[in-house]
C-alpha cells in the first residue's frame, strides 16, 4: 500500500483467538455487520485478532510500527488451567485477594480453554519483504501492550540492533514499573513482562509527550484511553494520508457503531470518546485506516451510512 511515495506493508507475526467482553452482543453470523469484519468474529463468540506490525519505508528510514508477540514457544502455546484451591499458586492468590469467586474461576477457566495463540512469524514476514532486522531504523510503538512489543527483544537482546525505539512517555511511565496486566499476560499468554521485554533496549528509547512529527511523513497523535499513552500513527505525503490506529479500536464494528465497544481499555470513558472522535473524523474521508488487530492487517475506509457507518476493506 502506498501513501504518496511512502510504502506501508503489513508484517504478520501471528494471531490470538479468544473471547472478549463487549458492550453489545456480537452481530449475528452472516449479517452485513458480521461480514464486514472479514472473519474476525468466529462462531461461539470468539474473536480472532491478527498480530504483527506495519513496515513503513519513508525516505531513507525503514520504520516498523508495532512488533507482534515475539518468539514462538518451543513447545507451542497451551492455555493455562487454574486450580482455584491451589493457594501455592501466586496467580490464584492474587485473584482471590481481588475477590474472584469460585464461579468466576470456572468462567476464567472456560475462557482460557478457548484461547489460541500463534506467534513467531515476524522474522519470516520481514524476510519475505527483503528486510533484515539490521536495516530497521525505527521501532515505533502505538502502545506498550505485550502483543505490540514482542520483537523489541528476543532471548534478552535487541532484535533490531540499529533501531531507535519510540513510544509515548505516558506508556513508558505506566508500564515500566510493572502493572496488573503483566500479572495476567505472563500467565495467560506466557509473555514476559514489559520491563523484561524492553530492558535490553531501554538505552535506545526516545519518547513523545504529545502530538509530534517523528520522522518525515510519520506523525503521532496521542489518543489515550486504551492505555495512558496510546497513540495513532499518521502517515502522510502531500494530499495522501493513512492512519494506523493501534488498539484504539480492535474491529471495524467499533468505528461503525458508537454503541459497540470491546471492553479492553484502561480508561473506558476516555477510550470511548477517543473512538467516537476518530469515527467522526474518518467517516466519509479518503484516509486509509488500519488497526493493529484487523484481519490480515488490511487497510480500509469508513463510509457514511444512513443510520450507521459502513466499513469496507480496501481489497473489497
Ligand atoms: Zn492493546
Ligand atoms: Zn493489541
Image: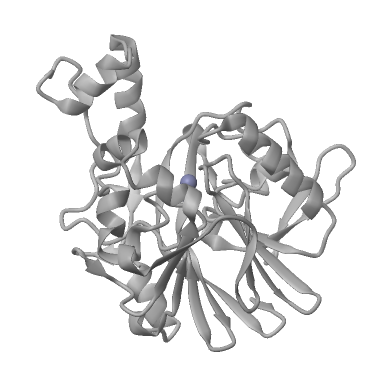
Q: Determine whether, in the image, residue 76 is placed left or right of residue 269.
A: left
Q: Residue placed at 52% from the left, 42% from the top?
A: 228
Viewer-nearest residue: 73 or 90:
90
Q: Is residue 27 visible?
A: no
Q: Is residue 91 visible?
A: yes
Figure quadrant of the N terminus: bottom right
Which picture quadrant has residue 6?
A: bottom right
The colour scheme used to paint the residues is one colour
Which picture quadrant has residue 238?
A: bottom right
Image coordinates for residue 14, horizontal then vertical, percent: 39, 59
Q: Residue furthest left?
A: 88
Q: Determine whether, in the image, residue 307 is placed left or right of residue 89.
A: right
Image coordinates for residue 311, horizontal then vertical, percent: 74, 51
Q: Determine whether, in the image, residue 181 is placed left or right of residue 49.
A: left
Image coordinates for residue 57, horizontal then vertical, percent: 55, 82
Q: Determine whether, in the image, residue 32 is placed left or right of residue 14.
A: right
Image coordinates for residue 251, horizontal then vertical, percent: 60, 46
Viewer-nearest residue: 86 or 180:
180
Q: Residue placed at 63% from the left, 30% from the top?
A: 269
Q: How many numbered marks appear?
A: 0
Viewer-nearest residue: 228 or 31:
228
Figure quadrant of the C terminus: bottom right
Q: Where 163 sits versus 146, above or below?
A: below
Q: Where 152 sits versus 27, above or below?
A: below
Q: Where 305 sits versus 21, above or below?
A: below
Amino acid at each position: 500500500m502506498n501513501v504518496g511515495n511512502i510504502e506501508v506493508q503489513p508484517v504478520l507475526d501471528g494471531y490470538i483467538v479468544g473471547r472478549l467482553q463487549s458492550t453489545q452482543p456480537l452481530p449475528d453470523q452472516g449479517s452485513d455487520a458480521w461480514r464486514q469484519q472479514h472473519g474476525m468474529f468466529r462462531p461461539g463468540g470468539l474473536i480472532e485478532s491478527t498480530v504483527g506490525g506495519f513496515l513503513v519505508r519513508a525516505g531513507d528510514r525503514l520504520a516498523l510500527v508495532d512488533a507482534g508477540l515475539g518468539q514462538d514457544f518451543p513447545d507451542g502455546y497451551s492455555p493455562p488451567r487454574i486450580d482455584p484451591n491451589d493457594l501455592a499458586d501466586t496467580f490464584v492468590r492474587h485473584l482471590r485477594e481481588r475477590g474472584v469467586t469460585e464461579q468466576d474461576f470456572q468462567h476464567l477457566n472456560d475462557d482460557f480453554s478457548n484461547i489460541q495463540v500463534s506467534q513467531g512469524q515476524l522474522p519470516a514476514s520481514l524476510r519475505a519483504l527483503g528486510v533484515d532486522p539490521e536495516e530497521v531504523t525505527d521501532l515505533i510503538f502505538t502502545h506498550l501492550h505485550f502483543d505490540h512489543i514482542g520483537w523489541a527483544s528476543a532471548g534478552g537482546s535487541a532484535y533490531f540492533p540499529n533501531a531507535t525505539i519510540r513510544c509515548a512517555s505516558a506508556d513508558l511511565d505506566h508500564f515500566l514499573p510493572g502493572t496488573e496486566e503483566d500479572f495476567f499476560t505472563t500467565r495467560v499468554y506466557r509473555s514476559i513482562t514489559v520491563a523484561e521485554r524492553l530492558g535490553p533496549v531501554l538505552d535506545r528509547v526516545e519518547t513523545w509527550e504529545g502530538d509530534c512529527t517523528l520522522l518525515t511523513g510519520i506523525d503521532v497523535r496521542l489518543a489515550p484511553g486504551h492505555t495512558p499513552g496510546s497513540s495513532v500513527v499518521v502517515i502522510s505525503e502531500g494530499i495522501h494520508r493513512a492512519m494506523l490506529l493501534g488498539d484504539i479500536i480492535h474491529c471495524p464494528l467499533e468505528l461503525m457503531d458508537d454503541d459497540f465497544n470491546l471492553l479492553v481499555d484502561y480508561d473506558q470513558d476516555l477510550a470511548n470518546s477517543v473512538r467516537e472522535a476518530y469515527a467522526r473524523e474518518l467517516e466519509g474521508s479518503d484516509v486509509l485506516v488500519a488497526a493493529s488487530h484487523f484481519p490480515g492487517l488490511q487497510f480500509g475506509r469508513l463510509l457514511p451510512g444512513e443510520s450507521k457507518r459502513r466499513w469496507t476493506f480496501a481489497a473489497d
